[in-house]
Image: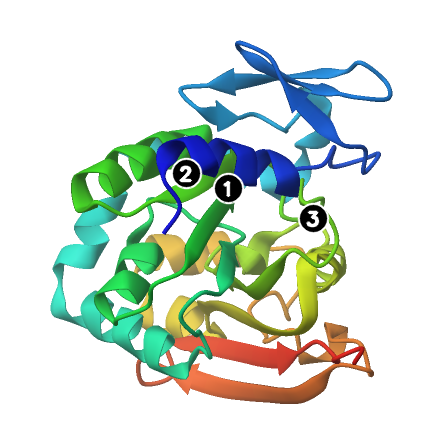
Amino acid sequence: MINPAQEREEMLSLLRHPNTGNRLQFDDSSLEDTMTGERFLVRDGIPVMLRKEDVFGWNRKQQKAYDWGSYLYDLLYKFGLAKRWLSEIAEMMAVRTGDYVLETSVGTGQQLLNLRNHGFDGYFFGNDISYGMLRKCRKNLEKWGVRAGLVQANAEALPFRDEAFDVVFQVGGFNFFNDKEAAVNEMIRVGKSGANLHIIDESDTRIREKSGILTRLISRFLPDSDVFKPPVTLIPDNMLDVKEAELLDGNFWMVSFQKPDKG
């Protein structure tokens, strides 16, 4: 694994302006676009690559909810079902030692710990729209002894260079993205040639049939009836080995596919 000094340089080599794609350079408390001079604050070692005007619609609602929920979120992982769910994810993901792995909505880092506990030894990176989640994630990773480069940004405009990661995955939150197709295409863009990509979220069955009355009431105001459906139709035709699976007795869905190998 890379040491702290190397981690900073490694992170910088991967980061790009999420809108222009330009390279960035560090100063004491910010990242600067080398072409335009635009600056992004670095808070507690976490680059904030997200402007206020970039967060709206369902993304803004999710950001607020997860900022507040970050204080209690880890309680969900103290129960047996959640641990079983994490185990299913780890066993179905094609992750190899030495891979560069990006989780596009990293939350509090539970999935990264899960991969480490399943014997994976590689390079972790995490992105999230919620700074509250990232702050909790940073504290968790320090406690668990798991190293990861963290950044706050929108999964629909990832702040990383093209073809940077061997594995890219998203767990939760995808159902409510403003632009799911853009998020899928961003995962593909930052994946290396031959990269494995995975998207996991709650199913229609869990939300509309097994959740509490409040969740079912909220679901009536969702933008469309297919919001909980696996995004198989959004996967470009040139992607390989597209698979759809059920997790945790149908409570969650998982869509996996592979980016074509240029070689």
- Please give the name of the residue rendered at 52% of the width and 35% of the height, measured from the top-left corner: 151
Q: Where 253 sits versus 216, above or below?
A: below
Where in the figure is residue 246, as x and y percent of width and height?
Answer: 43, 85
Q: Position of residue 135 (x, y in %)?
A: 35, 30
The residue carrying pointer 3 sits among few (fewer than 14), some (14 to 19) or many (20 or more) residues within 10 Å by Cα, namely: many
Q: Earlier in the sequence, mark 1 or mark 2?
A: 2
Q: Which colour scheme appears in the figure?
A: rainbow
- Name the residue rendered at 84%, 34% in the picture: 20
User: As displayed, is residue 123 above or below residue 247?
Assistant: above
- For label 1, the residue is 128
- Amino acid beneath label 3: Glu
- Mark 3 touches mark 1? (CB < 8 Å): no
The x, y position of residue 214, in whole percent, is: 36, 52
Q: CA distance from mark 1 to mark 2?
A: 10 Å
Residue type, label 1: Asp
Residue tagged by mark 2? 66
